[in-house]
Image: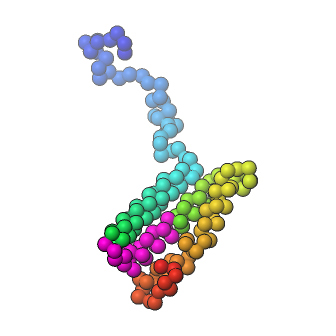
Amino acid sequence: MEGHSPSDGWIGASLLRKEDARFLLGHGKYIADLRMPDVHDVAFVRSQVASARVFLHYALDEMWSGAEARAITVEQRVQLRMASCNASSIAKQVVDTAYHGAGATAIFESNPFERRFRDVHTVSQQVQAHAAVFEAIGQYYLGLPLHPRLI
């Protein structure tokens, strides 16, 4: 279009474009046609991490407010325990998702991801992130007696 002026009559004129044929014949490629396996997992785990982070920060803020008032409540302790266990659980799920996406090479010790996989699973077995803590939290919300060691 260089060197043309609107007075040449090219504005609004039908132009031959080389990409038209493939679209007219049904061979065009659109964004919806692109398939990238496991890409949706990236968005999903990022949202999980963001949610866990927001919940943990909220619980920490609440606990800090209680500490400043010199009156930390059982509810604040439960919230913080729940948020920290949730963050640990989400971290494990994220690593599991990445591990499956990494494929067969992820199992080799020479792959840096293998060590991270072991580390997060080791942490998830510790008492601070164990499923028993969620049981105690459930007991609290159901009005059942609490095991003070877990809250």
Q: Is residue 126 above or below residue 52?
A: below
Q: Is 112 left or right of 92, judged from the image as shown?
A: right
Residue 123, given in percent of the width and then of the height, sits at: 60, 66
> Bounds of the magenta span?
69-87
> Which image quadrant for residue 76?
bottom left
Q: Taking 93 as reference, is 82 left or right?
A: left
Percent of width and height locating residue 17: 44, 24
Question: In the image shown, does 2 or 138 lie closer to the viewer?
Answer: 138
Name which residue lies at 64% across and 66% down. 122
Which quarter shows the N terminus? top left
Decide: is 31 above or below 55.
above
Q: Residue at x 31, y 17 (%)?
A: 10
**Residue 62 shows up from this direction:** no
Judged left or right of residue 81, residue 115 is: right
Residue 101 in the magenta stretch? The answer is: no
Q: Residue drawn 60% across and 71% down?
A: 126
Is residue 83 a member of the stretch shown in magenta? Answer: yes
In the image, residue 32 lies at what x, y percent?
48, 46
Query: Mostly what secondary structure, the magenta segment?
Result: helix
Give coordinates of residue 34: x percent, y percent: 53, 44
* Residue projecting furthest to the top: 3
